[in-house]
Amino acid sequence: MIPRYARPDMVAVWSPETKFRIWFEIEAHACDALAELDVIPKDAAKTIWEKGGAATFDIERIDAIERETKHDVIAFLTHLSEIVGPDARFVHQGMTSSDVLDTCLNVQLTKASDILLADLDRLLDALKKRAFEHKDTITIGRSHGIHAEPTTFGVKLAQAYVEFQRCRDRLVAAREEIATCAISGAVGTFANIDPRVEEHIAEAMGLKAEPVSTQVIPRDRHAMYFATLAVIASSVERLATEIRHLQRTEVLEAEEFFSKGQKGSSAMPHKRNPVLTENLTGLARMVRSYAMPAMENVALWHERDISHSSVERYIGPDATITLDFALHRLTNVIENLLVYPERMQSNMDRLGGLVHSQRILLALTQVGVSREDAYRLVQRNAMKVWESYHVSGDAKVDFLEQLLADEEVRAALSEEEIRSRFDLGYHTKHADTIFKRVFG
Amino acid sequence: MIPRYARPDMVAVWSPETKFRIWFEIEAHACDALAELDVIPKDAAKTIWEKGGAATFDIERIDAIERETKHDVIAFLTHLSEIVGPDARFVHQGMTSSDVLDTCLNVQLTKASDILLADLDRLLDALKKRAFEHKDTITIGRSHGIHAEPTTFGVKLAQAYVEFQRCRDRLVAAREEIATCAISGAVGTFANIDPRVEEHIAEAMGLKAEPVSTQVIPRDRHAMYFATLAVIASSVERLATEIRHLQRTEVLEAEEFFSKGQKGSSAMPHKRNPVLTENLTGLARMVRSYAMPAMENVALWHERDISHSSVERYIGPDATITLDFALHRLTNVIENLLVYPERMQSNMDRLGGLVHSQRILLALTQVGVSREDAYRLVQRNAMKVWESYHVSGDAKVDFLEQLLADEEVRAALSEEEIRSRFDLGYHTKHADTIFKRVFG
Amino acid sequence: MIPRYARPDMVAVWSPETKFRIWFEIEAHACDALAELDVIPKDAAKTIWEKGGAATFDIERIDAIERETKHDVIAFLTHLSEIVGPDARFVHQGMTSSDVLDTCLNVQLTKASDILLADLDRLLDALKKRAFEHKDTITIGRSHGIHAEPTTFGVKLAQAYVEFQRCRDRLVAAREEIATCAISGAVGTFANIDPRVEEHIAEAMGLKAEPVSTQVIPRDRHAMYFATLAVIASSVERLATEIRHLQRTEVLEAEEFFSKGQKGSSAMPHKRNPVLTENLTGLARMVRSYAMPAMENVALWHERDISHSSVERYIGPDATITLDFALHRLTNVIENLLVYPERMQSNMDRLGGLVHSQRILLALTQVGVSREDAYRLVQRNAMKVWESYHVSGDAKVDFLEQLLADEEVRAALSEEEIRSRFDLGYHTKHADTIFKRVFG
Amino acid sequence: MIPRYARPDMVAVWSPETKFRIWFEIEAHACDALAELDVIPKDAAKTIWEKGGAATFDIERIDAIERETKHDVIAFLTHLSEIVGPDARFVHQGMTSSDVLDTCLNVQLTKASDILLADLDRLLDALKKRAFEHKDTITIGRSHGIHAEPTTFGVKLAQAYVEFQRCRDRLVAAREEIATCAISGAVGTFANIDPRVEEHIAEAMGLKAEPVSTQVIPRDRHAMYFATLAVIASSVERLATEIRHLQRTEVLEAEEFFSKGQKGSSAMPHKRNPVLTENLTGLARMVRSYAMPAMENVALWHERDISHSSVERYIGPDATITLDFALHRLTNVIENLLVYPERMQSNMDRLGGLVHSQRILLALTQVGVSREDAYRLVQRNAMKVWESYHVSGDAKVDFLEQLLADEEVRAALSEEEIRSRFDLGYHTKHADTIFKRVFG
C-alpha cells in the first residue's frame, strides 16, 4: 500500500480493526448457531455478542499475544476471552482458523467491491454529465492517430460511459462470486461442526455458503475477482490515454483541470502536463499485474496449501486500494476536464477541409463521373491542400475554395452540391440515436 | 496453433472458409436491411443470398487478389462479385472493413464459446459420474501435502465439479459479452449507414448491437473474454496438479489410464508417468498468458488503432484451440482415471492410526482429563507410532494398540470409547449433505 | 506461428528438417566420443557420419513410425537405422531421449539468437545512419506529450541506438546462457554414459556442457532467454510508439514510408496510417507475454516433469519468429522513415517562441530583476502568445516581438540580449558530445 | 511493503532518510563539479558538503514544505537551504528534478542489488555446505514424480547451487546495467549544465554516465532489472517446491527445521507443514509479477512521461524487499533442513528393488538373450513385485529374490551377475565429477 495512492475508506477495509471486527462477528454468529443447535448455552452466545460487540479490540495486545503464540487466530481468541470472560470457552468450537480467515477475506473483498461500485457510479455520473454537455460538440474522430471523420466529444464520452457500465456489471458478478462463507473444518467435511452453522453465518452476514470448501475457499473465485479488477484497470488506462492524447501540445482539445491561480502563476503557460492521467496509466499497469499471481494461486495442492496467503496479503489491499484511488482520480479528472471546442474546430480546420474529400468523391461518382475521373479531380485539389498542410501544420489552401474554382468539378457539381458535402451535421446526425442506446 | 494440441471443430472456427462464410453472411444480411430501407433493390439482396449462399469461396483466388490489392476485405468482395455478378455492386454499401472484421471475430469467439461450453458439459458429466462412483471412497485429506483428516474421493471430485460449474457460468457471461455486432462506419457515427442495418444484422445473427463502437468493437469485451479463459485454464491446472500428486510413486492413489496392453508390455511397471496432466499444466500456462496482451489491447488510441489485430491473430485461435484441447484431454483423463481405494486406505494405515490423535485428545479432555495431561498421554503414544513411521514410511507400531495398552489412558477412556474415535465414518458423515449442495 | 509475421530463415530453425539434422549431429558426435572411449567400433562411427550425413531424412516416414511407436526419438532412430544399416545399433547407446531433445532445443535457440543478433545489427546500422543524417535536425523535445526544450532528431535516434545496443548485449548474454548441452541420462548422473561423451558433443557443437542436468537442462536458462526477448520487444514497442506519435495528423514530423505511387493514387492524402508501427506494438505485446509461462516452467518437479514441453512448443517458435519479424520490420521502418524537418520547425514555431520563456526569465534575474518582477514580465507577454495559440493551434502573437515591445523588459535587457535567448543552438550545442558517447 | 516479509537493511534502502541522503550527495557532488568548472564558488561547494554532510534531514519538515509546494525536490532543497544558509543558492544549478530522482533510484537499486548479492552468497554457502554433507546420500531421482534412477541428495543440492550461481551472475549484470547516472536537463541535451558535471557525479558515486538520457534514464534498464529478479524468484520457487515435495507425508525425505521443543509439544507429530517453502512459493509469484509492469514502463512517450513513476513506487521497494526476504528465508530453510537418509533408503526399498529392472534387462540382452525373451523374463518378475507394491505402498515381494529364484533368468545370469546389477554405486559413481564441475 502506497499512502499517496490510498483513500481512507478502502484502507479501513484492510485495517486490523476491521479484520478483528469481522472475525468477532463470524465467531459470534457461529455461537448463535451452535446455541440454536444446543451445542453451547444460549446465554453464552448472548454474553459473547454483548461483551464482544461493545468492546474495542486492543490491536497491540493481540499482536503481543501473537508474538508469543505465533498464531493470529489464537491470539485474537485469547484477547476475546479477556473481554468476554468464562463464556469465551464456547467460542470457535469445532472451527478451524481458515474458517475465520477465509470468510473474513471474502467479507473484506465484498466491502471493497461496494466501495469500488460506488466509485464506478460516481465515474458514470461524471461521464454522463459531461457526455450530455458535449453531445453536439463536434470533434474529429481519429483512427491510427490520423484524422478520419468527425464525431462529437459527447459520443466519445458515451463510449467511455458504456465501457464503465460493463465494468460495473462485471464487478457486480465478481462481487457475487466472492461473497461466500466457509465454516467446514480441517478438510471441508464438517467433521466437527454442523453444516447448519455455516448456513447461519452465511445468511447473517449476507454471504452464500460455499458448496464445497476444503479448509479453504477455492481460489478460482479470487482469481476471477482480481482478473475483473485488471480488466477495469485496463479501461481506466484507455480513458486516461485518450486524455493524455487530447492534452498534448499539438492537439490540446482537452486538459486536466488547473485552477485559475495555477494558470496565472506560470511563466511557461504551455507546460500543463497531464500528470494525473499519466499516473493513472501507471496505476492501471499495477492493478493489471495482480491478476497473474491470483491465477497462479488457484492450483493449491490437495485440500490446501498456504502459498496463496502471502500473495493475498499483497494483492488484497494493493489491488483494491489502488483501483479505488484510480477510479476516484479519474472521476475528478472527468468532472473537471477542461474541454476546448474551439480548438477541436480549429484542429479540423487546419487541414483545410480535407476531411470532406471522401464525400466529394462519392458525390462525383453519384452524378455519373467515372471513378477514375472522380479520383483525379478530388486528388488534384486535395493534394494542393495537403502539401500546404504537410509542411506548416496549417493548410494555407482551402479545399472547398479549390473545388469551387475547379471548372471540371463545377461541370459536375453545383456550388450548392459541393457546399452541402462540407456539412458536419452529416456525420453527427445519429448522436441522438447513440445517446438513446447508451442512456435510454 | 500447434497441430498436436488442436481439435478439428475448433480449428474449423478459425479456418478461412469459416471466416469468409461469416463475412458473406454479414454482407448479405446488410443487403437485406438496405433493401428493406430502399437503399438497394430487393432483387439484388435476393440474388446475393442465392448466389453467394450456394457458392464455395475459392480461398486461393481470394489470396491471389489480396496479394494484389493488399486488402483482405476488398479481395473477398472482388471474389464475391465474380460469383454474384452485377448485383455485387450493392454489397458493402456504406460499410467499412472493420464492420465486417470485428463482427466476424465476435461471431468466431461466440462459436468457440459454444464448443468450450460443450467441452465443459462433458467434463462436468465425467466429474459427476466419477464423484458418485466414489462418494464413499475414503481417502486422506491433505493440507500442506501432509495428512490431515479423512474425506472421500467423491468429495474431492464434487469440489472439482462445482469449480468447473463456476467456470461454465463465467464462460456463459463472457460469451454474452462478446456476442456483439458493429456496423457503424469509420468512427462509429453511422454517417454512411443507417443504424437499423446494424440492428438487423445483430438480430439475424444472434448478436446484440454494440451500443457505441468506434470503427471497432471496444476491446474490454475481448479482454474479459480471454481473462475468463485464463481463469478456466487455472482450474484445469488445479485438477491436473491434483492427479499428478495422486499418481506419484509414493502416493499412487490414482493414475491416468493405460490399457492392459500397455501395462503388459513394460519391464518397468513402476514407470507410469502422469504425462497427460503434466501436459495440461503446461497448456494452462499458455492459456493464462494470453490474458495479458488481451488486456493491453484495451487502450487503443482514440477511435482505434490497429495494434490489437496482430495480438488477436495469435490469441484468438491459440487460446480457444488450446483450451478446447485441454478440456477435452482433461475429460478423458477423468473418465478413464484409475482409482485405487485400497491404496488410499493403505496410505492412511501406514501412519498407524495417527490421524485420529486429535479426536483422542478431545475425548480425554471431554471426560475431564486436564489439557496438559491429555496432551502428555496422546503425545507419548503418538510419538512411538510416528518415530517408527518416520524412518520406514510404515508405522510398525499401532496407535490404537498403544492407547489400549496405556493404563493411564484406559483409566480415563474405555476400550469402546477409544475404538469409537477411530471410526472413519465420523469424518465422512456429511458427504451426502455436500453432494446435495453440489448436485441437488 | 502466424505466416504473415514469419520470415523463412527463422521458420527454418524450427522446421522438422533442422530438428532431425541436429538430432543426427548429436547422435553422430556421441558415436565419435563412444568410439574414442572404445565403447563402440570406430568404423561404426565413421559409417554413421557418412551415411547419415549424406542422407535426407524423410519427414513423412518418421511421422509414420511415430504414429506407431508414439515416441519421436525412437521414430527418428528407426528411420536412421534404415539409412545407416546394421551399424545403427551403436547409435544412442546409454543416452535418453531428453539428452537429444534438450540439447537440440538449445541449439535451435542458439541459431535463433544468431538470426536475432544479425537483425539487431541491421537495426543498429539503420539507426546510426539516420541518426547522423539528422544529428542537427532541430525538433522539439517533449515531456508528458508537451513541448519542453529543443533537441535534435539525431539525438532521439541516438537514444534508440544505445537502447538497442543494450538489447544486443543482453541477447549475447542470453545466447551464452542457453548454449549448453546435456548428455547425462535419466536423472543426470551419467550412470549409463561417460561424462566425456557430453564434453565431446559440447565442444563439437559449440556448446558448453551443462554442469548439472537432471535428465533436462534447467529451465531458469530458458526463462532468462525469453525474459530477455521480452525486454527487447519492449524496446521495439518504445521506438514504434515514438513513430506513431510523430505521424499523427497534428504532429506529422515523420511518417512510415509510402511510395510516390501510393501517394499519387490517393484522394485522401491525409490518411497515411502508421500501420507498421501499430503492428509492431501488438507484436511486442505477444513477445512480452511469453516471458511469463517461461518463468513458470522453471519449477519443474524433482528431477523433471514434462509440463515445460508444451509451453516450449508454442513459445520457442512464436517468440523468436515474432521478434525476428518485428526487428526486421522496425529496421525497414527506420531505413525508409520519411522525416520532415520543416514541419518540426513549424510545430515549434506554432507556439510563437514560448519555448524560450524559461531562458528569458533567467536572463532577467541574471541582470538583477527580482524573481517576482521577472515572473510578472515574462508571464504577461507569454500569456498573450499562449492564449492565441491555445484556441487556434497557431500563435498569432510572437513572443519575441512582444518582449521587444515591452518597455519594462527592454529597460532590463537589450534587443541583442533578448534575441540571443532565442538561439536554438543553445539547446543543441552538446549533440556532438552525445554522439561521441554513443558512436565513439 | 508487507512488514512481515521485510528485513530492516532492505527497508532502509527505501526509507526517506536514505533517499534524502542520496539526493544530498548528488547535489553536493554537482556543486564540486560546478566549482571545478568555475560556475559556482569553491567555498560554497565546501560549505554545502560540510553543513549538509553533518546534518540530519528533518523528514517531517520536508513533508510540510512539500504539502505547500507540491514538489518533493523543491521541498528538499528548501530544507537544505535552511541548513546550509546563503550558499544554498548555488545548489541544483542547471539541474532538473529528474536528474536527482532518476539517479537516486538507480543508487537505491544498486544498493538493493548489493544486499541481494550478499543474500545469494549466503544461500550459496548454505547449499554448498549441505551439498558436500550429502554428496553420497543416496536418494531416488524422480521424473514425473515417479521413481526413476538413484542419485544423491548432494547432487540435487549441487544443481540448486549452480542454478543460484547463475542467478548471481545475472544479478551482477543487472546491477551493472542499472548503475547509471543522468544529469542532463529537461530533455537530455545538457542545455543548462555541462556534461562534465554528470561525469563527475557518476565517478564520485560509483556509477556510469548514461550515454543518452531524455530527462529520464531509459526504462529498458529497469525492465531488465526486474525481469532478472523475476527469474531469480522462479528459481526460489523451484527449490521451495522441491522441499515441499520432500516433506509430504508419503515422502518425508526432508523437512523444514523445527526445534526439539516444538516437536516435543505436539500431539499430532505427523502434522509438520512446510509452511516456509509454501510461503516462498507465494512470494515468488509476487516478485515474478512485477516484471510485467516494469516492461510496460519502457515505452514512455517521447522524451518522457511520468507513467513509470507510480509503478516504481510499488515495485522498487516491493520486488527488492520481498526477494531479499525470500532469499534469506530460503537460506535458513536450507541451513536447517532436516534430511532423512534412512527414509530416502526406505522409500526406495518400498518398491522392492524394481528400480533395477532396467539394468537386469540390459544384462540379459548383453549375455545374448533376445530382446523379447529378456522383456518377458524381467516383466514376469517385476509385475509380481509391482502388484504387491501397488496396493499396499510396500512391496511384500523382493525383485532380487524373484530373479534369483527364476530358473530361466539364472540360466542366463549367475547370482553374482544379478546381484551386481543391484549396486547403487553404479548410479552415483560420477557424483565426484559433478561436484568438481560445480565447486571446482
Image: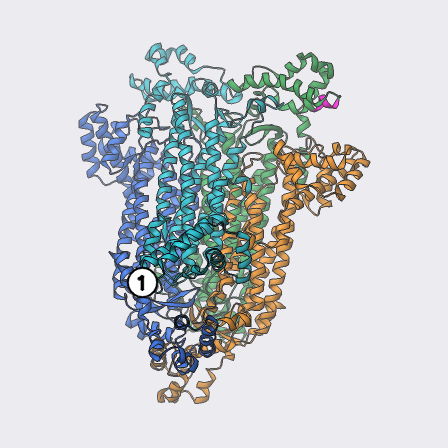
Chain colours: A orange, B green, C blue, D cyan
The location of residue D310, given as percent across then percent down, is 49, 55
The location of residue A96, given as percent across then percent down, is 66, 34
Q: Describe residue C76's horizontal placement relative to residue D135 as left or right.
A: left
Seen from the viewer's position, the closer of residues C251 and B27 is: C251
Identify the residue position indicated by label 1 in the image. Answer: C155
Q: Describe residue D280's horizontal placement relative to residue C225 as left or right.
A: right
Q: Describe residue A197's horizontal placement relative to residue C313 as left or right.
A: right
Task: Give the residues in magenta.
Answer: B362-366
Establish if D43 lies above or below B192.
Answer: above
Seen from the viewer's position, the closer of residues C266 and A140 is: A140
Q: Quadrant of the C terminus of chain A?
A: bottom right
Label 1: how many residues lie within 10 Å, few (<14), some (14-19) or many (20+)? many
Q: Is residue B310 visible?
A: no
Establish if A40 lies above or below B345.
Answer: below
Establish if B173 lies above or below C394.
Answer: above
- Secondary structure of residue under mark 1: helix
Magenta region, main secondary structure:
helix
Seen from the viewer's position, the closer of residues A193 and B177 is: A193
How many numbered marks are there?
A: 1
Q: Type of residue at label 1?
A: Val
Q: Describe residue B168's horizontal placement relative to residue D303 as left or right.
A: right
- Magenta span includes D389: no
Q: Is residue B28 visible?
A: yes
Seen from the viewer's position, the closer of residues B108 and A297 is: A297
The location of residue B232, given as percent across then percent down, is 53, 46
The location of residue D143, given as percent across then percent down, is 42, 30
Label 1 chain ID = C
